[in-house]
Amino acid sequence: MLALFSPAERVRFIGVFAAMLGMGVLQMAGVGVILPFVSLLSDPSSIHNNAFLEALYNGLGFDSTNSFLILLGSVLLVVLVVSNVITAFTLWLMTHFAWSVQRRVSSRLLAGYLAQPYEAFLNRNSAETGKNILIESQQFANGVLMPAMKSMAFGITALMIVGFLFWVNPLLALAVTLIFGGAYLLVYLTIRRVLLSIGHERMQANTERFQAVDEAFGSVKEVKVLGREGHFLERYEPAASTFATAMAKSQLLGQIPRYAIEGLAFGIVMGAMLFVLASGQGLQSALPVASAFVVAGYRLLPALQNLYQGFAQWRFNQSVVDTLHNDLVAHGISGGACDFASTHAGAQPAPPDKSAAKLPFEDTLQLDQVSYSYPAADEPSLRGISITIPKNSFVALTGTTGAGKTTLADIILGLLEPSAGEIRVDGTALTPENRRQWQANIGYVPQEIYLTDSTVAGNIAYGLPDEAIDNTAVERAARIANIHDFIADKLPSGYQTQVGERGVRLSGGQRQRIGIARALYHDPSVIVLDEATSALDNETERRIVDELDAMRGGRTLIVIAHRLTTVQKCHNVFMLDQGRLAAEGPYEELVLGGSTFDKAAKS
């Protein structure tokens, strides 16, 4: 748990721990003042037998023991109220601390996941990532950190109260400690394995719940058309049932001992009174001791219950701690590296052209014997690819499905690291150190344009807060992408029109053009279109490619295309086949050459 704290949080935790100690001292004081006060009530004359009380009685000018007892009772009441106020404040402090840690842990997780290379996302379900950031970090705060701090706080309180009871009557205190403590310990040891098991079940079921919901609403159009609502509901229900059952079992196992032990406590208090009376002491001497044990029990039982519940919830949520700890450590931002997250979480992002200097690109982009294999893949996706792309050229990467086009594009984009070979920009090798500088040159248009539920301007200036959007750059990009007139004339609020979730209020061609405008917003020198027009009809696709060729204006254009008829204006075409470079050259030459390229073009 401490490994998930930042250095600043560890310092704050010391302050929280000090508050726990103060709470324990005041709780003990609240119990401790009961004994002398009840003794005075049972024998008021004993005021004059105690030197301190006698001096206080005379110093304050009292002439009535009743008035003096009222004063002492008022002081006792103040002590009890103050101890409760401090307890409430300590609980507030712990709660505030726990949820501030949750916020920072979730921010560190998000920062860590986003900082991972693109390859890390290929084998990880996005629903699990979102669940860890949003839900499991909450479970950590509410089900691990808060119970752990309560265990510490009330454990300190219980120790101090037990210490006071030993001072009052060691034999009775030993009996109370062994019976109460032994009862809770026995229950915990009996159910600890059950708690760990249902904790694993809860976490697995929670992941399955998120996956079912994410997949259902991620493809809601297909779900509605095909009538597959029942399928996703059937996937969700068993996971939801397992999750609910695990949570219910956890809460039940955390509460059951309380009621049994409260009855046991009442019997112990009665037994204590009978023991005192049986030992030959009169009711006058038994009453103060019995009162002290009653008040001690009133304070001790909740403390022991909180201590037990803390251990039980910790055990139940052990898998949460393990998962978050492993992810944070794996992403290199746990412990002392938490400054990374604190620096980036909440910071306003700067446009790429301002956050990183661009890698100079004045001559050529070269791929020299580049190969790549996906993790756990049997065969490489690319094998010894060597191509040269001059600046300001219009080139195409083509081939059948699975030929390696998108993989090659991802390598050019700097998303994947070649397994072998080298990428050079103007002779400078592309490395992890300068990759971000190379990416600052690139505008990317993916096959599926993702639009957020925000304005048209917000989607073109993707990832920037409203106050950081350059509206002039937005309009310039929209004009180049041939969508400005539609936005200005057809949309009710122009660039401030909400596009709906995933752009459902726009046609496919309109979403495509907004995606192109997004790629042009930062005025990149290289534009990569990864089958960005494959979902369009032939005529629309050809028109968009023609427009891209016309609007290049000194830009390098790299198009990944499946249909070859749309790349006729390219300066050079690279055809891939099973991860290898099968053909290269201008479109006309390759078609006339009767190569594999020609066969693909005719198909």
Image (spheres, grey):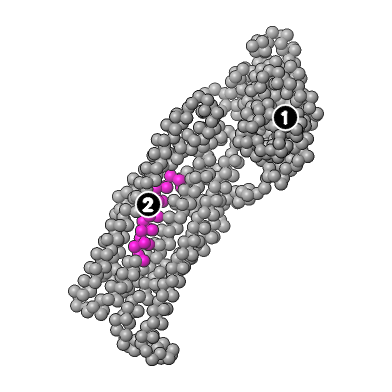
Residue drawn 59% across and 40% down? Answer: 114
Q: Can residue 45 be seen in the rendering of this structure?
A: yes
Residue 353 in the image, given as x and y percentages of width and height: 74, 40
Residue under circle 1?
527
Q: Residues within 10 Å of mark 2 (few under 14, many from 20)?
A: many
Vertical position of residue 92 compared to residue 475: above or below: below
- Of residues 252 and 116, the one nearer the viewer is 252
Residue drawn 28% across and 63% down? Answer: 265
The label on residue 410 is none
The label on residue 312 is 2
Residue drawn 55% across and 45% down? Answer: 109
Q: Which residues are magenta?
A: 299-322
Q: Residues within 10 Å of mark 1 (few under 14, many from 20)?
A: many
Vertical position of residue 247 compared to residue 262: above or below: above
Q: Secondary structure at mark 2?
A: helix
Disc nearer the start of the sequence (2/1): 2
Residue 392 in the image, given as x and y percentages of width and height: 78, 27
- Alpha carbon distance from label 2 to label 1: 56 Å
Q: Is residue 388 left or right of residue 202?
A: right
- Of residues 410 and 201, the one nearer the viewer is 201
Residue 261 in the image, given as x and y percentages of width and height: 29, 59
Q: Most prominent secondary structure in the magenta stretch?
A: helix
